[in-house]
Image: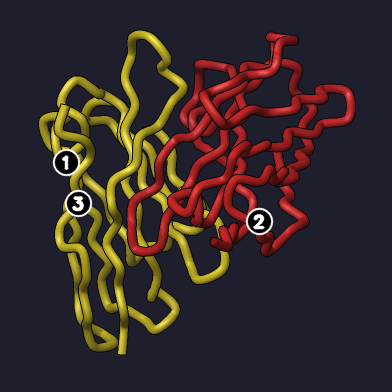
Amino acid sequence: DTGVSQDPRHKITKRGQNVTFRCDPISEHNRLYWYRQTLGQGPEFLTYFQNEAQLEKSRLLSDRFSAERPKGSFSTLEIQRTEQGDSAMYLCASSGTTGRIYEQYFGPGTRLTVT
Amino acid sequence: AQTVTQSQPEMSVQEAETVTLSCTYDTSESDYYLFWYKQPPSRQMILVIRQEAYKQQNATENRFSVNFQKAAKSFSLKISDSQLGDAAMYFCAYRSARNSGGSNYKLTFGKGTLLTVNP
């Protein structure tokens, strides 16, 4: 069990640029979640995948955001035309379908700074 | 919609002492899960302890224990024999127990409590 990994750990970009983040869940986990955490706040849910299907999207996920999980393995989160308000920590989590399926395990996050 | 409130933005404790972090939540559901997560500075979020709402017995994990008061919708975390490594942001989180519909799987977090451990 290598845990949830995310890449990159830090990203600095200029306003208007596109960015893409990657998340690799725990290998046997079929559920994957994206959260956003701004300074001084708890994480807020963005979207959820079960295998390759995106089953839920938060209102926070504007049209500039898109997430994919091809083949039900890793996931990518893309932000188009970034804005300063997109600056945040983007967290990925995964959970399984056996045992304590309600427990989510988090990756280290990708810290995005939009200048 | 469920909400989670952590009323203590910051707490401090002396090393080896005991500290209690507060959490209240609001829900109309009867079955759910509650969690405490720890987020050390610049490090990833770690699950500390979990509580199933249908269980009356309070969960315990080594030096960490909870006081779950379902009627009062309260879920506090007690850390005994505090260690320097306990210093972190602590988040209380809620998850519905319903296993249908993606929105039931998400965690709803409080704003967190920053715990400082003084040597």
Residue position marked by numbered label 3 in the rendering = A6
- Chain that appears red: B
Q: The residue marked by circle 3 belongs to what chain?
A: A
Q: Are marks 1 and 2 on the same chain?
A: no
Q: How many marks?
A: 3
Q: Quadrant of residue A48?
A: top left
Circle 3: element type: strand
- How far apart marks 1 and 2 lie (CA) works out to 37 Å
**Above or below A42: residue B100:** above
Residue position marked by numbered label 1 in the rendering = A24
Give yes or no for contact between labels 1 and 2 (Cβ–Cβ under 8 Å).
no
Residue A70 horizontal side relative to residue A43, left or right: left
**Above or below B100: residue B38:** below
- How far apart marks 3 and 1 lie (CA) works out to 6 Å
Q: Residue B84: where, in percent of width, then height?
A: 47, 54
The single residue placed furthest to the right in the displayed view is: B72
Whichever of labels 3 and 1 marks the residue nearer the N terminus, that label is 3
Q: Amino acid at mark 2?
A: Val
Of the residues tagged 2 and 3, which is closer to the observer? Answer: 2
- How far apart marks 2 and 3 lie (CA) works out to 33 Å
Q: Amino acid at mark 1?
A: Asp
Residue B108 horizontal side relative to residue B38, left or right: right
Q: The residue marked by circle 1 belongs to what chain?
A: A
Of the residues tagged 1 and 2, which is closer to the observer? Answer: 2
